[in-house]
Amino acid sequence: MFDEYGFPRAAGFDSDFGGPTLETFVYCSRAAEGVDDAEVDRMVAWSQRRNVARDITGVLVFGSGVFFQWIEGPPAQVKDLIASLHSDPRHYDIVSLDRSVEQRERIYPNWQMELVGADDILAVLQDALEAAEDENNIAALRRILAHVSSGPLDTLGRS
Ligand SMILES: Cc1cc2nc3c(=O)[nH]c(=O)nc-3n(C[C@H](O)[C@H](O)[C@H](O)COP(=O)(O)O)c2cc1C
């Protein structure tokens, strides 16, 4: 609770006690009509600046008119972002795949919101699983790999 100088630790950086408290939100959604690669690039550039300020990291996959996003960060910030995402007209049919609050290290510590092609998502998740040491991360990655392998990206992409 207090560091060696007696100051309260910053919330979310309690790394001596199993890592910071992180909320993870993983979902799929369908892109609204007119949302093309150029619009997604603009949105990602904007989101990356915003995520730095909110201490949010993650991955956004876009392909076949479908978004898949992995978001991790301080619970209050992630909660705000989820509310914004639900009222964003650039996508719809938001399907929540995983939402949890855990004390753990980030899976994507250096990605303020990396845009990945749909063909690469399995490889990205497999790499993350191979690199993961934290038990909670391993469990979360196995869950999401199971979701992705069972086809939500493909099935949501086809109308
Ligand atoms: C697929 C998708 C992913 C998004 N990802 C992020 C993100 O990682 N960070 C972010 O700040 N906004 C993201 N946005 C934009 C938010 O939905 C919202 O427009 C933005 O946070 C501003 O919200 P506010 O007007 O409530 O402040 C995303 C939007 C879409 C459609």
Image (cartoon, grey):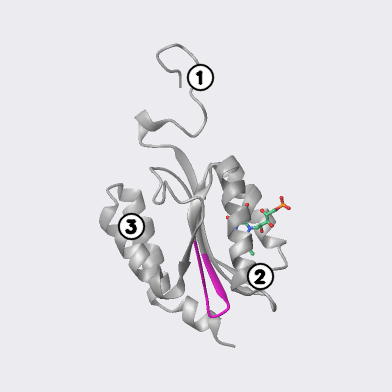
**Frontmost residue, 158 versus 111:** 111
> Which stretch appears magenta?
60-68
Instruction: Look at the image and tell me in which quarter the C terminus lies.
Output: bottom right
Q: Is residue 88 magenta?
A: no
Q: Amino acid at mark 3?
A: Ala
Relative image position of residue 46 (x, y in whole percent) = 63, 54
User: Could you give the CA–CA distance between mark 3 and mark 2, rounded to whole angstroms?
Assistant: 26 Å
Residue situated furthest bottom in the rendering? 159
**Left or right: 136 with respect to 65?**
left
User: Could you give the CA–CA distance between mark 1 and mark 3, rounded to whole angstroms?
Assistant: 32 Å
**Left or right: 128 with respect to 116?**
left
Kindly identify the residue that appears in the image at 55 percent across and 43 percent down.
Answer: 52
Q: Is residue 50 above or below residue 139?
A: above
- Residue 91's disc is 2
Which SS does the magenta portion mostly show? strand
Relative image position of residue 54 (x, y in whole percent) = 59, 42
Label 3 or label 2, whichever comes before in sequence order: 2
